[in-house]
Every structure is written in structure tokens, then in C-alpha cells.
Amino acid sequence: MSSLAPSDDSMHGVYLTGHGGPEVLEVRDDIPRPAPGPRDVLVRVGAAGVNNTDVNTRLAWYSKGEGDAEDASWSGQPIHFPRIQGADICGEIVAVGAEVNNVRIGERVLIEPCLQEHDGQDLASAWYIGAECDGGFAEYTKVAARHAHPIKSALSDVELASFPCSYSTAENLLTRTQLAKGERVLITGASGGVGSAAVQLAKAHGAHVIAVTSAAKADALRDLGADEIVLRE
């Protein structure tokens, strides 16, 4: 089901037309609006953040070889152009596939950027939205319903669009280290996006958090939950 008019079949967005500098980005107003598959939701994008993942994907930084960058995505697959980038997405569900409960229409959501499912298929290796498939640098994007997480927050869409990559990266780091309640954890680069997320998440895990930062940012990190501050030179 959908809350969209049938005539809404195109959208504004930014195409990535190849690997390179900003010249390979093309603003368009005739991009076909994606249609959700049976297990998908269609999200009207409220805001999409820009981070190093988007820049590095455009530059083919993730390629493990040289020359034609045939493995320039996170999964080692080629990127098919044109591609819509944008991995940090906050928006509203405006349509759902046949197998998704239509009560989800109208939900405000954050999209999990690391995908385990696409077009109704479980993926053998994780994809990153905005690289292996289209992301949020457009009016609409589609994603498997399991990757669109309801969010209730007083923060704006712009503020929330800074969360997905940094917080999912930080939580993955803490999960892989099996951080437990009462343990002490040292977080370097604590004032950055991933670092500040790690401070808050480690505190939520019940850890004693030691943050490495500059004097100018020490108070802000204490406000985020750091128990101790180590000033870097």
C-alpha cells in the first residue's frame, strides 16, 4: 500500500555517474522513483548525511586493485552506474510491499546502512546502502523493511541523519570486543563521530569510559558520559 499519488513516478536526486571528483555527480529531476518489492518499504528522505564512506566510494578508495576499480564497493563487487549514494538516512515510510504490514506507513525511521537483504533476497555478504544499491541522496529510497527502524526522537531529521554509520560502527566495535558491564574501556579520538558514539554506547553497556581528547572538547565528552579524560598533546 502507499500514501503516494499514482502520478508521483519521478524524483529529484543526485546520480553518481562514475568514479572521480565532484564532476561525476549529476543533479537530476527525472530519476525514476523506486517501487518497493514485497518485503520492502519506500522511504521519503527527510535528510541524508554525507560522510567519508560516500566520498571514498566515489573515489574508488575501497578498490583492492588498480585501474578500472571493478571491486570498488565494500563487498568487493563493482559499482553499477548511475548510482544514488547516501548511507545515513532519516525519513518517513510512505509505501510498503505486499508482505509488510501497512501500519508502518507514516513511521519515522532510521535506515541501517549495512544490509543483509536486498530485493527480497538474503545476501551472502553484506552490502552497504549507497554503494551496492541506491541510497538516500534523492527524495525517496527503498530498503528491506527489516533495515528501517522506527525512531521516536525530538531531534530533527538532519540531526538524526548523522547517526547510522557512526553509531553502527561504534556498536560493532564494542560488540566484537565483547565489552561487559564494569569493564574499563579506552576510547581514542573520542570527540569524532564514531568516538563520541562509542563513549555513549560504552556507557550504556555499563562500562567505565576513559576518553582521549583535547582540552577544548573535554567538557562535552563528560556530558556524553565519559568517566575520565586523557588529554592528548
Image (cartoon, helix red, strand yellow):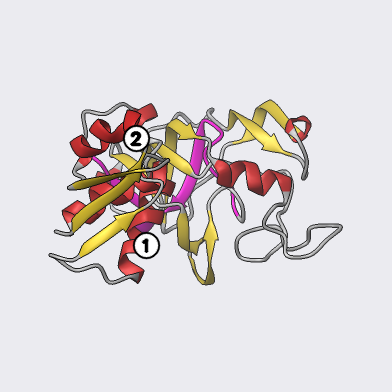
- In this image, 192 relative to 26: left or right? left
Q: Closer to us: mark 2 or mark 1?
A: 1
- In this image, 37 relative to 23: left or right? left
Q: Judging from the image, what secondary structure is the residue with disc 1 in? A: helix
The part of the image, by quadrant, that contains residue 52 is top right
Taking the spot 52% from the left edge, 39% from the top edge, the residue there is 136
Given the image, on which type of amino acid does mark 2 rest? Leu
Given the image, on which type of amino acid does mark 1 rest? Asn
Q: Are marks 2 and 1 in contact (CB under 8 Å)?
A: no
Taking the spot 68% from the left edge, 64% from the top edge, the residue there is 77
The residue positioned farthest toward the bottom in the image shown: 124
Which dot marks residue 160? 2
Task: Specify whether residue 149 is painted magenta.
Answer: yes
Q: Name the residue under label 1.
A: 172
On the image, the x and y values in percent for residue 197 come to 32, 46
Q: Is residue 223 above or below residue 230?
A: above
- Asked if residue 116 can be seen in this view, the reply is yes
Earlier sequence position, callout 2 versus callout 1? 2
Q: In this view, does 76 lie above or below 105?
A: below
* Quadrant, the N terminus: top left
* Quadrant, the C terminus: top left
- Asked if residue 152 can be seen in this view, the reply is no
- In this image, 33 relative to 101: left or right? right
